[in-house]
Amino acid sequence: MTGQSPPSPQNHNNSNGGIGPGESFESFFEGWRTRQNQYLEQLVFVQENCGQIPDRDVQVLVSRVLSHYQQYYSTKSIAAHENVHTLFAPPWFTPFERTFLWIAGFKPGLMFRIVNNSVSDMSQEQSRQLSRLRLEIRAVEKELSDEMARVQEGVVGGQLVELASRTARLVDGEADELGEALEALRAGMEVLLENADFLRMTTARAVVEILTPNQAVRVLAAAAELFRRIRAWGLQLDMARRGGGRSPPLRP
């Protein structure tokens, strides 16, 4: 980029940015979140110097940010194969953060709300393309929500609850049935998570493809800032609860 620019995010994980030997997904995620905040600084810098930085260099930054999100989803997929249940209620998130989760992540449609709040100079053609994309994404969201409901109904209404409720007195063959039911549940949740993450990443890439590089910078900066604030608010609420006081006004 021409002129002064903020330092590039530092990768403290292994060479490809994924989980290093002996590293937990939680540890990876903390490093990933640190780099996300560093990317946020770069995005804000570009916003503040709009017009002084070539589109080519802006596009390079946008591509790097998208690759950063892709790295997260790729690493999360590996972690899901090890323990998918934890990813649906991650203990490294605050309770407040977990209220925003939809199939172990933010709902893809949130991207369109961020666009509406951060981009005011779209052309009519861009608006038409985004409207079509929104409808397509909403339809897939519904399919995944319906599938999640079927998985949950299978747990509550099926044999899994019955078998689990009398684990100590299972007769011959029932222990195998319980194991098979648990494996089917795990596999179903893993497929759901991967499909939801694929939709999240596909939505982000499709939205960015419609926008100009500088518009994309505004959207990606707004998204990163929203996630940062949700994290900060969650930590504030946790501190208030531990202190036994009333929840403080949420501050950015």
Image: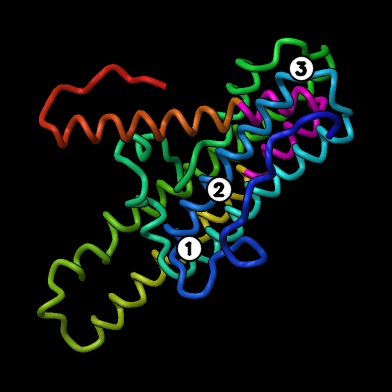
* Coloration of the structure image: rainbow
**Is residue 159 positioned above or below 39 on the image?**
below
Front position in the image: 13 or 85: 13
Amino acid type at image mark 1: Ala
Question: Which secondary structure is most common in the magenta stretch?
Answer: helix
How many angstroms separate mark 1 from mark 2 (CA)? 13 Å
The residue where tag 2 is placed is 196
How many angstroms separate mark 3 from mark 1 (CA)? 36 Å
Q: Quadrant of residue 249?
A: top left
Amino acid type at image mark 2: Ala
Region of the chain picked out in magenta, as a range: 201-221
Front position in the image: 96 or 22: 22
Amino acid type at image mark 3: Ser
**Is residue 182 positioned above or below 206 on the image?**
below
Q: Nearer the viewer, mark 1 or mark 2?
A: 1
Residue drawn at 48 percent across, 53 percent down: 29
The residue where tag 1 is placed is 80
How many angstroms separate mark 3 from mark 2 (CA)? 25 Å
Q: Verify CB contact (< 8 Å) between mark 1 and mark 2.
A: no
Q: Earlier in the sequence, mark 3 or mark 2?
A: 3
Q: Provide residue 184's location: percent of width, then percent of height.
A: 41, 69
The residue where tag 3 is placed is 127
